[in-house]
Image (spheres, rainbow, N blue to C red):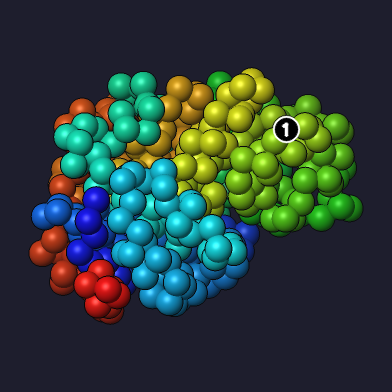
């Protein structure tokens, strides 16, 4: 494909309600979008980096800088024939996986349009519908926490994930389990616990959780493997898994029994598929994580979730849980069975509302392929 230009934008979108994790509260999102324009078509990508380097080292501002200085110029002069070429084009840049993923995924998005096939099919997906769960932020009170769970169960979601941290864990699990003994329930600590919390984490076994997500350090496999040996509940790794090799190491060491795959965290669709395949070959189920995405990242998560080994409900949920108005049409909707239908139309299957994106844009820069010649 002959790339004409790459456009970077920052859009600002207020969340319908603040989202609190063990590392902080998000009220408004600052989102970097990329457009890769080639042969009269536009592929879109979303960078999932946050405003602060709390979930990962990357932020929207580091991603913007690396995209302008390194990644977009490299891509614009490479004219890749498909998305799978992007890791090679970006290889000399160490890290910055969320920045790389935004561009790589835009190229896959573009390629699906050029070939006139659904993005899910281009990725190798086979599912017609994907099972959906929700990630519920830490609430101001137990009553509000229970009300939030009740609302999402009523909407049909198949799995409830509770954000937790020391001081906001067993009491909450106990209250939720007492009220709903049968539901699929999990928790996500975003690395909030330490070695001397091992006994405390073992006490989570009483609540029949589907998994405990990333209890320990974001860069650790070894102590997670020690923890996994001591507890019955499956450990799921999120932050720790950066690529296929990490997944292999974690599985081999027994650091986890489930893997959360996030497109941005692993650097784009190519590596996400590689992690998926490695886990599948070893009998480890995966699910698709979320990063409070706008409709563009969300549509890409839906396509990824259509791969076979995404057998557990993901954190990919309806647009209206996040936004008063999403930037895609139709918005992402979840059925009363807690499922999202995978689009069968060419490309990502959701139109970008370009007028709305334009209105939300607070910063814009462009890299033109011709200027590089
Ligand atoms: O750890 O999965 C996480 C949101 C931001 C950063 C990290 C995480 C999350 C979520 C929300 O859990 C998932 C979503 O609803 O998009
Ligand atoms: Mg997580």
**Res 144 visible:** no
Residue at image location 17% in from the left, 34% down from the top: 116
How many labels, in total?
1
The answer to whether residue 183 is above or below residue 247 is above
Q: How would you rate the neighbour count of disc 1 (Cα within 10 Å): few for under 14, some for 14-19, many for 20 or more?
A: many
The residue to which callout 1 is attached is: 251
Q: Which SS class for mark 1?
A: helix
Residue 339: % across, % down? 34, 27
Return the x and y of residue 191 as percentages of the image width and height.
69, 55
Q: Nearer the viewer, residue 80 or 253?
A: 80
Image quadrant holding the C terminus, namely bottom left
Q: Which residue does the image show at 31% across and 46% down from the upper left? A: 81
What residue is shown at x 77% (from left), y 46% (from top)?
221
Q: Nearer the viewer, residue 243 or 135?
A: 243
Give the quadrant of residue 170: top right
Residue 238 screen position, x and y as percent: 61, 46
The front one of 25 and 190 is 190
Q: Quadrant of residue 222?
A: top right
**In-front residue for pair 212/356:** 356
Q: Is residue 350 visible?
A: yes
Q: Is residue 86 above or below residue 151?
A: below
């Amino acid at each position: 494909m002959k790339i004409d230009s790459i456009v970077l934008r920052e859009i600002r979108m207020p969340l319908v309600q603040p989202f609190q994790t063990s590392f902080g509260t998000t009220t408004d999102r600052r989102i970097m979008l990329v457009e890769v324009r080639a042969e009269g078509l536009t592929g879109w990508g979303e960078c999932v980096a946050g405003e602060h380097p709390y979930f990962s080292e990357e932020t929207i501002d580091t991603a913007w800088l690396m995209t302008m200085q390194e990644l977009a110029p490299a891509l614009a002069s490479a004219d890749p024939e498909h998305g799978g070429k992007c890791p090679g084009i970006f290889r000399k840049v160490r890290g910055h996986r969320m920045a790389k993923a935004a561009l790589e995924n835009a190229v896959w998005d573009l390629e699906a349009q050029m070939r006139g096939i659904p993005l899910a099919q281009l990725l190798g997906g086979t599912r017609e519908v994907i099972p959906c769960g929700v990630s519920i932020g830490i609430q101001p009170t137990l009553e509000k926490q229970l009300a939030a769970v009740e609302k999402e169960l009523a909407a049909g979601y198949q799995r409830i994930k509770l954000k937790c941290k020391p001081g906001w864990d067993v009491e909450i699990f106990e209250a939720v389990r007492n009220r709903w003994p049968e539901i699929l329930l999990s928790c996500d600590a975003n690395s909030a616990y330490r070695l001397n919390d091992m006994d405390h984490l073992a006490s989570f076994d009483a609540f029949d959780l589907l998994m405990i997500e990333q209890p320990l350090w974001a860069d650790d496999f070894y102590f997670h493997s020690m923890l996994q040996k001591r507890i019955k509940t499956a450990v799921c790794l999120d932050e720790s898994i950066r690529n296929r090799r990490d997944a292999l190491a974690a599985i081999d060491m027994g650091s986890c029994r489930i893997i959360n795959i996030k497109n941005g965290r692993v650097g784009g669709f190519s590596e996400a598929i590689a992690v998926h395949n490695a886990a599948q070959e070893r009998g480890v189920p995966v699910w698709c994580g979320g990063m409070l995405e706008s409709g563009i990242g969300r549509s890409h998560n839906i396509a990824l979730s259509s791969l076979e080994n995404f057998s557990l409900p993901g954190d990919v949920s309806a647009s209206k849980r996040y936004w008063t108005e999403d930037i895609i049409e139709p918005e992402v909707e979840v059925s009363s069975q807690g499922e999202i239908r995978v689009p069968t139309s060419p490309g990502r299957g959701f139109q970008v509302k370009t007028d709305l994106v334009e209105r939300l844009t607070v910063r814009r820069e462009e890299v033109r392929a011709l200027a590089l010649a």
